[in-house]
Image: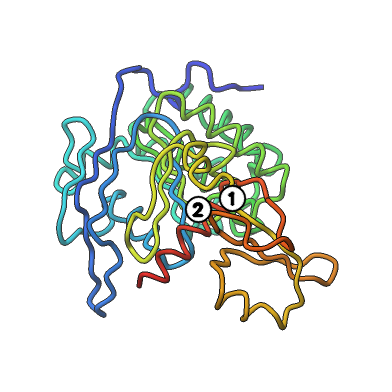
């Protein structure tokens, strides 16, 4: 079975790189301000960008992927200016957008071979080894000769992952990559990203807290176009440790609790509504302490930003 050793999938240089984003802003023609002075230093490895739908994640990803121009700010990757040196950036970029088109009457094998050729991998045997390794890693080997138009949603997503990893990408951007993947496929993808992320900057944009918690040493939370938190997931979780309280209530009581306390999240369990509350001390003896996790951090930051807005 082919493997990734010796292929162009992993970056050969171990030179440390850092992506520096300074005061990045973007307002669309309809007046929506998608990005508001976003500033982030993203080191080599896996970096998680967490936020709800419409928070500005895709706008930031599209800007970094050279697909749209920012109104203000700067983005540097080593000596490269991502906002100006677009052709050079595209040579070292791997990108999987949230939605991407395919050629429905072309097989995955032929399409990946074609993309690899376009990315400058001219040696036929090297290209063959790379394509076969990618098909195996993304669990598409058995359906490599089927037309892409016959693929399920999850299979198309895995193909998108494969094409994003072609060449020697120094910067890989994946936008909501686990959408459509079953649990086994998700684990496979997580393992692949962890392997590649050892020598590459990978930005994982998602609204799935578990993906960030499992994979990323550094992260940021974005809401309404602004960075509302950034740092190590463990450190961010420590900030709310001892401040999360939970209680089972009847659904009709929820508005009353929202008026009196900072309710950061709710979920149903056995017909009851379980609320999580952010509070320095126990609200009353009907609440019990809940171990803090990254999801609590996420919802507390999102709620705080919504209140301030």
Depth check, front residue: 250 or 21: 250
Instruction: Please state the horizontal and vertical placement of residue 59, each as a whole percent of the image.
Output: 34, 60
Question: Which class describes the residues within 10 Å of circle 2: few (<14), some (14-19), or many (20+)?
Answer: many
Tell me the quarter of the image containing the N terminus: top right
Is residue 140 shown above or below 200? below
Instruction: Please state the horizontal and vertical placement of residue 98, each as a whole percent of the image.
Output: 48, 58
Instruction: Please state the horizontal and vertical placement of residue 234, each as a whole percent of the image.
Output: 52, 36
Depth check, front residue: 190 or 148: 190
Q: Are marks 1 and 2 in contact (CB under 8 Å)?
A: yes
Q: Give the residue at mark 1.
A: 178
Q: Give the residue at mark 2.
A: 206
Residue at left offset 40%, top offset 62%: 223
Instruction: Please state the horizontal and vertical placement of residue 123, each as a whole percent of the image.
Output: 40, 23
Classify mark 2: helix, strand or loop.
strand
Q: CA distance from mark 1 to mark 2?
A: 8 Å
Tell me the quarter of the image containing the C terminus: bottom left
Q: Earlier in the sequence, mark 1 or mark 2?
A: 1
Q: Give the label on residue 136, or none.
A: none
Q: Residue furthest front?
A: 285
Is residue 159 shown above or below 276? above
């Amino acid at each position: 079975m082919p493997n990734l050793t010796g292929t162009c999938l992993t970056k050969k240089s171990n030179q440390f790189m850092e992506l520096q984003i300074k005061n990045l802003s973007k307002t669309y023609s309809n007046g929506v301000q998608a990005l508001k002075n976003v500033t982030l230093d993203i080191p080599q490895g896996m970096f998680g960008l967490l936020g709800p739908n419409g928070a500005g994640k895709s706008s930031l990803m599209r800007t970094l992927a050279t697909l749209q121009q920012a109104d203000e700010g700067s983005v540097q990757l080593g000596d490269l200016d991502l906002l100006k040196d677009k052709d050079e950036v595209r040579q070292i970029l791997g990108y999987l957008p949230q939605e991407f088109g395919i050629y429905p009457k072309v097989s995955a094998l032929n399409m990946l071979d074609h993309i690899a050729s376009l990315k400058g991998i001219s040696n036929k045997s090297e290209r063959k080894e790379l394509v076969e390794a990618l098909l195996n890693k993304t669990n598409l080997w058995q359906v490599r000769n089927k037309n892409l138009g016959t693929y399920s949603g999850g299979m198309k997503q895995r193909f998108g992952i494969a094409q994003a990893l072609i060449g020697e990408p120094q910067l890989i951007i994946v936008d909501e990559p686990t959408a459509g993947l079953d649990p086994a496929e998700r684990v496979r993808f997580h393992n692949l990203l962890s392997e590649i992320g050892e020598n590459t900057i990978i930005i994982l944009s998602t609204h799935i807290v578990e993906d960030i918690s499992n994979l990323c040493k550094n992260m940021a939370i974005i809401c309404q176009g602004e960075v509302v938190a950034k740092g190590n997931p463990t450190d961010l979780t420590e900030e709310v440790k001892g401040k999360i309280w939970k209680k089972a209530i009847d659904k009709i009581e929820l508005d009353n609790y929202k008026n009196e306390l900072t309710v950061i999240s709710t979920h149903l369990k056995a017909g009851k509504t379980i609320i999580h509350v952010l509070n320095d001390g126990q609200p009353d003896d009907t609440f019990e302490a809940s171990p803090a996790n990254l999801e609590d951090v996420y919802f507390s930051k999102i709620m705080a930003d919504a209140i301030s807005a």
